[in-house]
Image (cartoon, grey):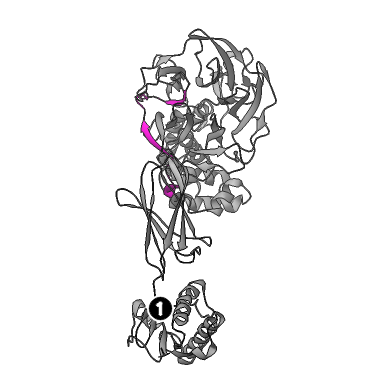
Amino acid sequence: MKKLYITLSFVIASGILSAQNKDTKAADKLFDRYEYTEAAQEYLKLVDKGKADNYVYKQLADSYYNVFNTKEATKWFAKLVEEKQDAETYFQYAQMLKAEGNYTEANKQMKTFASMKPNDSRAKAFTDNQDYVSDINAQFKLFGATKSDISSDKADFGAFLTNDNTLYFASARNTSRKEYGLNEEPYLDLYKATYNSNKTISEATTVDNLNTKWHDGPATITSDGSTMYFASESFNESKGFEKDKEKQLKFGKIYLYKATKEGDSWSNKKALPFNNVAYSVRNPSISKDGKTLYFSSNMPGGLGGEDIWKVSVNGDSYGTPENLGSRVNTEGNDSFPFVTDDNILYFSSDSRVGLGGFDVFKVNLNDSSEPMNLGLPVNSEKDDFAFSFNTKNKVGFFSSNRDGVDNIYIADPICGVETTVTVKDAKTGKLLQGATVAMIDEKLELVGKSETSENGESIFKVNCDMEYAVQASRLGYENGVGTMEKSEGGKSTVVINLEPIKPIITETEVILQPIFFEFNKSNITAEGAAELDKLVEVMNEYPEMVIFAKSHTDSRGGDKYNMNLSDRRAKSTVQYIISKGISKERITGQGFGESEPKVDCKKCTEEEYAQNRRSEFLIVKK
C-alpha cells in the first residue's frame, strides 16, 4: 500500500461482506477493497454522528496512512494513541509525523515504540542515534536532483535507463484506463522514451505487447538489451488469485515476468517459476552479467513486511530465492532494489533512520560496509524510492511524492573527494593533535571545521570540482594554510606544517604561550610539554640562564586549595625541564595560588580568569 503500490489487487465478487458492526459495514467493505479514500469518508460519517470508537479511529489512521495522506493520518493517530496501542501503531505514527516534518513529536513516538520493542532493529537504530536528522542533513551531498520533464500529473516511477538510451518507467498517465481503487488513478502501464545527450527526454509512448488491463511495471533490462524482467499482476494467470469466501473477494498478487526482444518489439512473455499466489514478487533489477536477479517480496522467510531478495539466473532456469538478510532488510518495508554495474545496491526503506517515509540507501555488495542514507536532496520528508543509476551515462533516476504525486527526478552525481588534512610541527615533523582545521570554498564560505586526531589528521568530504583553501591553527604555533586542488574524485591528502611560535626573551622573563593543565590536575599535558620544550631550547641556547617558574591560579576555589594546586603544578613544570637534561641548579619553581592576580577583579570575566590562570618564567640569571 503506502508506496508499495501494486501489492494486492482484487476482483469484486457479488455478495455481502462481513464487517466490524452494522454501523461500520459500508466503510469496512470499502476498506477491504483497498478503496481507502472512500472508506475514510464513510468512517468520518460515523465520527460526525458520534458513533466512532477506537476501531473507527484505527481504520481512519490506517486509511490515510495507506494513501500517504500524512496530515490526516497524524490527526487520527494522535486520537488513537490517547489509549495504549500496539507497538507498530506508534512506529507508523512516527513515520507520518516525520513526513510532516515534525521530528520532535516523531521522536517521542519512537521512544514509546522502542520501549515496547527494544530488540527491534528499528528501535535499536533510533536509540543508538537520536540526532540522525542533523547527521543526515550535514553529510556530503552525493547527487543533485531536478524534476524530470517526463513526469506527468499522475503517478510516474521506476525509471530505468538502458545502455542504448531508452528510458523505461511505470506510469498511470493513461486516463482512458480503468481507475485503481487504492489511489483513484488509472492502472499502471509500462512506458518508454529516449534520453538525449542534453538530458532532455522525448515524449513517452507505451511499450508494445507487454501492457495488460492490470498494473504493469516497473522493469529492468539486461546490459545487452535483449531481456526484460518486469512486474505485472497474477490475474494474468488462470489460477493467479485467492478467494476470500467470507468477504467474497478474489485477491491477486504481483508476479515477475520475463520477455525477450525481437527487432524493436518485446515478445515471449513468461511468468517466473518462483511466483506464488501466496505472496508478491516485484521491483526487479538484473545484475550486469545477467546471472543474478534482485527483487522485493513479502514471501515467507523474510524479516519484515517486504524484503529484498536475489535469485540466480541461468537462461530460463532459476535458483532458490535468497533473502539479503539483516544487513539490508528490517522488520519494516525494504523495497525497490537496483544493482549497478559495479555491484552497488540502491534500495528504499521506510524503517531505517531517515528523513521520512521511504528513504533511498546504498550499500556496497563487494564489502561488509553498512547501508548509507543518500541524504539531501535525493531524500526528503516524503517518500523517495525506485533509485536507479546508469554507469555509462553517469546519471541516476529516482521517484518521489514530495510534490504531492509520484514524479521522476534526475539524479546527477556530485563528484566527491575524501580529503585527509595532516598537520605537523614544521621543525620536528611531529604529528599535531588538537589542531583546528577549516575548509574554505571558492566562495569564501566555511564548508567544514574539525580538530585533528591523535595521528594529526582531519578528514573532510567535499566537492572534487572545486578548489579549497585549508587553514590550520594550534596554540603555540603560527597559523598555516594549504590548498586542495580540483581532482577527479576519490581521495586526496593535504599536509600543513605549522611553525612553532618562538618564545619572547626580555631582560627579566621568557614569555611562552599559556601552559595548560587539566582541571584539578598538575601533570604536564601534551600541549604543555610542547610549549615547555621551547623553554628547554632557550636554556640550551643560553647555558648560564637560571629560571624561576611561578604558577598562578584564578580566584575560584579556596585560598589554601589554590596555593597547593599551583605549587604542585610549579613543581611538575620544574621536573619536566630537568627531565629534558637541564641541570636542577638552573631551575626552581613555586606556586602562588591566587595571591598575585594579573587582573585585580572581584567579578571577573572568563577572559580575566584566563589571564590570572598563568605560568611565568622569570630570568634569575642570563
450 vs 80, nearest the viewer:
450
205 vs 31, nearest the viewer:
205
Q: Image point 48% across, 92% down: which residue?
A: 560
On the image, numbered disc 1 is attached to which residue? 512
How many marks on residues? 1
**Residue 413 point in image, percent of width and height:** 42, 35
**Residue 68 point in image, percent of width and height:** 45, 35
- Span colored in magenta: 136-161
Q: Image point 49% across, 9% down: which residue?
A: 265
- Secondary structure beneath dot 1 equals loop
Q: Residues within 10 Å of mark 1 (few under 14, many from 20)?
A: some
Q: Image point 60% across, 46% down: which residue?
A: 121
**Residue 426 point in image, percent of width and height:** 44, 64
323 vs 124, nearest the viewer:
323
Q: Image point 61% across, 52% down: which residue?
A: 118
Dividing the image into 4 quarters, which one contains the C terminus?
bottom left
Instruction: Note whether residue 516 is visible.
Output: no
**Residue 132 point in image, percent of width and height:** 48, 50
